[in-house]
Each structure stands twice: as structure tokens, then as C-alpha cells.
Image: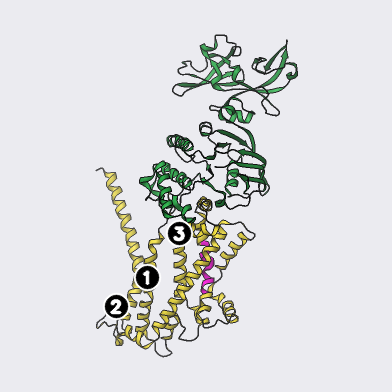
Chain colours: A green, B yellow
Amino acid sequence: MAEVKFSNITKKFNENVVLNGLNAEIRDHEFVVIIGPSGCGKTTLLRMLAGLEEITGGEIRIDGVLVNNMHPSKRQIAMVFQDYALYPHMTVEENMSFALRLRKAPKAEIEQRVSEAASILQLTKLLKRMPKQLSGGQRQRVAIGRAIVRKPKAFLFDEPLSNLDAKLREEMRVEIAKLYQRLDATIIYVTHDQVEAMTLASRIMVMNHGVIQQVGAPIEVYRKPANLFVAGFIGSPTMNFIHGRLAAEGGKLYLKNESLSLLIPSFLLSGTAEHDGREVVAGVRPDDVLAGSAAHEPNKKYSEKLEGVLEVSELLGHRENLYLKVGQTRVLATVEAFFNQSPGSGVALRFNYENMHIFDKASTKRIND
Amino acid sequence: MNKESVVHKRKKAVKYLLIHLALIAAAAACVYPLLRILSVSIRPGDKLISTDLSLIPDGATFAAYARLLKETLFLRWLWNSLLITVSTSFIGVSLASTAAYAFSRFRFAGKRSGLVLLLSTQMIPAGMLILPLFLMIMKLGLMNTYLGIIIAYSVSSLPFSIWILKGYYDTIPRSLEEAALVDGTSQLGAFYRIILPLSTPALSIAFLFNFTTAWNEYLVARVVLFSSQQYTWTLGLFELQGQYITQWGMFAAGSMLVTAPVLAVFLYSSKWLISGLTLGSVKG
């Protein structure tokens, strides 16, 4: 398997700079998910690694070997495309064996590898079919099979599940997780779906505007987002952001805006006077907002009680989303179903300090531990 | 059944009737001249100028066919035409398929203007090209040769073929070639192994266009070829028209015989003209 190193990678399309001095390392046997919004450069990075896109500047090394000008097939990587890219005029078997046939591998070896991959992916019965006779999920499995057969150093996945419906996507996600456990391969997986990132990755690489925002284990990225972008991008529903200014009063620190005044305890953000007057954004996930009767009990881990008004509630089944307004500040709370309050009614709420994040408004960087 | 649906059904029936009448009339207009040629070709020699309109005339005979094959170089002309047409079609399609690939997939200076230039050559009337073609072929020393006429035909149908093929390649997802590149082909390998097999409908159309154009061409052949041994059938049949007498029977028999190859090519390639071959390869 392989280690991949991106050093100072730059990519320009005419005058448009997509990646600017990007550095990253992917370790052997690691499942790295590159996630970011459309146009953030994640697919470009993957295509550069595959050799399908020219590198404007910098170096890409696979296992220490510089591959900048190496033909895609010499890089010993396999890629699964977003649109599957199955050869329409070939059967499933021919699709899967194409690379080996090109390499003039012995017939027995080709048969053995294809049947092995087919049995892993439950494609054995479909080997003689043409791609157009397959369902979306089956096509995706063939595309993965085509990659497995080659026994590459690294697998590259370019948004492989984005064309599948929700149920199939869930199934394929589990399949890919199982496959990773089985193959123990290096996998680099590009997606904009954070559920895929959270569930599949050993490490997540969050990108925006061609810049890596944060790299870390999924739970680390979720619990300790490095900046406002990561905080807003990872997690569903999206994190609540409370904009305001820090004020030091009587040895204590408060987050104040026109709607509320929130004590910021020292275990959340150390130091008082040095933060006075600093414009910040406090982030709290909807799951960390206590609402309704639960918020009436005082709790040291939680903020003081705030009074909000319920605007809309959404029943999701076992959970319920409450869209609240505290003065002019909007807050989303996700609570146990059934909340049973009608829109317009007053709702008490508290924020969980343990999972609160403070970001500097100017730099957007996280400033609490 | 209520009144409205009866009226609706009647209207529909009348519409179908009118459409079919129009189609039958159009079909008849197309087929009638062919039938008349067939009729003339099998008339006995003394009834050629007859005004009889029956399809199979009294005393129908294949004598004109026999005379055409025996007394003229018709078979030779047919062979010449076939040789020139098939060569032209293969050369034309081969050149167009690679040129169109470059236009479809690569970015290079002059790509757009090149395409427009190719298209604009199609606006020039064929007659205007005769003199330049004549001069070029003469300077190349290829007058009265197969090669000369093959070159002239191949290049004149290139622009159309390039446009047809480029348009088709554009619809083939690039990810297919990229997958092939990752799998181990070269760019050219991806073209031969993936793009070409998927382009059979467009290649067939380009081939048919080259074939029919070259098969029926007269003007350029008249200028380039001047010995009857080298004639194509179009020039050969014209030979039958004498100053005082025209062999209408043989003329018609020849006309019937030359439709056979074109018909055969059409029937054969029709199975390749089924589009939608790329269905199922990518999402959707």
C-alpha cells in the first residue's frame, strides 16, 4: 500500500487559482476523506494525484516517488469515478479485466482476480451483463470491482455515491466501509457529504477555496472545529452561531449582543481582560441546546436560562428541531420528540458550555481549547 | 360511449388518414421514377420510345442488361467506381475520425477558427472547386489516376465528416477515456479502444455520406479521368449517350445496376445506425 505526499501544490486554470501551495500527507493504510463544498478544489486535487490533471506547481509523491509527470497507469492507483465510467460496449467481466488485459496478464490470473473481486462485491451472477442492464448500485459496484482487480497501491474515490438515492447510498457506504476493513488499503475519498466523511474516514481533510481548513479524526473535527468554516460545514443540522462582543465585567467575561448577555466561564475561555471588546462568534450545536422544561433546572455545565420564542418546530421522528428566537438571535435546538409546544409560545433554553466553541470573528479561528 | 369521445375518435381517424395519404403520395413520387427506369430497362429494343405506361412491358427482356455487360466496359467502370468509393470512404472516415477527436478533446490555438473554416468550405458550390482541384491534381501528376480522384473525393467530404464525428464525440463522457488512461491505455489507446467502438453510429453516417457522395460524383471525375479504362460508372453511362442516338435501354439497365451497391451499404449499415449505445455507462 502507499503513502501520498502533496508538497506545495498549486493549480491554476488560466488565471483562476484553484489550489495555492497545498501541503498534505496521507499515511499508509489510511482512509482519508477530503470534504468541502463544490468548487473547493477537492476533486482537482484527486485528479492531479490520478494524473488526469496537470500540476501547475509543487510535487506529488507516492511512496516517495515523484509522480508529477508520470502516466496515470504507472502510478499504481485505481480510481472510481462519480459517474462510474463503465465502458458501455464491454460486459461487466470485460470492464473489470480491462486493465489486466492491457497489461497482458496471464488468463488464469485475470479470471482468478475477476472472480475474487466479483464474489467480494456480489457481482458473480452479473459478469456477462452489459452496464446498461445494471442498476445504479450494481454499476457502482462494478466500478469498485474494476479498481479492486488491479490491486493498486491506493484507491481514489471521486464522490462515488453522489448519484445514488438515499437508501442505496447508505447501503454502499456500509459496503465501502467493509471493503476498507477487508482490503486494508490506502483510500482517498472525495465527497461533499459529511455523513460519508464522518462514518468512513480515519481522517477527514476539510477544504475550502483550495485551502485545507483542518485535518483530523472525524470526532476531532466534529468536537473541535478549527475555524468557523469547519464548524459550519461539519455537523447536521448546522451549528448555531451567536455573534457578539466579549465584555469583561466584574472579573467575569460575557458575550453580549443586542439580544442576550451570555456568561463565558473561565473553563471555556481562559483570561478575561485581554478579551475585552473582542468581536467573536460562539458556536453551539443544536444537540447542545437544552430547551423547554429540561432548561428550567440550573446546571453548572450549562449557561444561564434564556427566554426564547418558538417559531417553527419540525418533527423528525425520534427527534424534533425547534427553531427559536432569543431577541433577534436565532437558535436551533434539537430535542427529544414530542415537544408539544405551539409556535409563538415562550421556551426556556440553555447552552451546553462543554461543547461550546468560541471563534475570533476577524480571523474566524477557534480561540478556546 | 359519449358524444365527445366519438367526435375525438373521428377526428383522430381523419388525421391519420390525411397523414397516410400524404406519405403514400410522397412515397409514390419517390418510387415512380425508379419503376419507370426499371420498365425502360426491360423493354424490347423496338419499344424504347413507346408511350406505354405499363410497368412490365409486352415482350419484357433483359437484353439491354446483357448488351451493357457484353458490349461496353460497364463492369470495368463499376469496379473503378467501387475501388474509388471504398478507398475514399475508408480514407475519409479514418482522417475525419482522428481530426474530429482532436477538435473534440484537445485545446489548441485555432481550434474554433479551424472548425468555422471547415464549415465554411461546405458553403462553396462544388462547381467552383473544380478548377482548383484540377490544378492541384495536375501539379501532383495524378491526372487520370485512381489516387488523384481518391484524394479529391476524400478531402472534399472531410469537413462534413469531421463535424458529424466531433459532435458525436462531444456526447461521450470524458470520464470513460480517463478511466481507460488510469487502467493503462495511452491517449491514442483510449481513442481506439473506447471512443471508436462507441462511435459506430456516427462513423456509419460519415462512411455512408462519403460512400454515396463518391459513388454518384460526376463533375470532378469528368475533369480528372479521361481514359475510358479509368472511368467511373457515372462517366461510363454518359458514354452511352451518342451524338445521334442514345442507348436508353442500356442507360436504364446501367442505372438499375448501380443502385445495388448503395442499397447494400445502406441496408448493412442500418444496424449500426442505432444510437444510444452509450446508455448505461454513466449515471442516469
Same chain shared by disc 3 and disc 2: yes
> Which residue position holds label 2?
B53
Neighbour class for label 3 at 10 Å: few (<14), some, many (≥20)?
A: some
Name the residue that disc number 1 marks.
Answer: B263
Q: Which residues are magenta?
A: B152-163
Mark toward the start of the polypeptide (1 vs 2): 2
Q: Which amino acid is tagged 2? A: Leu
Secondary structure found at label 3: helix
Q: Position of residue B199 (x, y in %)?
A: 46, 59
**Of the residues shown, which amino acid type is indicated by label 1?**
Leu
* CA distance separating discs 1 and 3: 24 Å
Question: Does A292 sit above or below residue A160?
Answer: above
Chain where mark 2 sits: B
Cβ atoms under marks 1 and 3 closer than 8 Å = no
Nearer the observer, B235 or B274: B274
Residue B35 locus on image (x, y percent): 32, 74
Residue marked by disc 3: B197
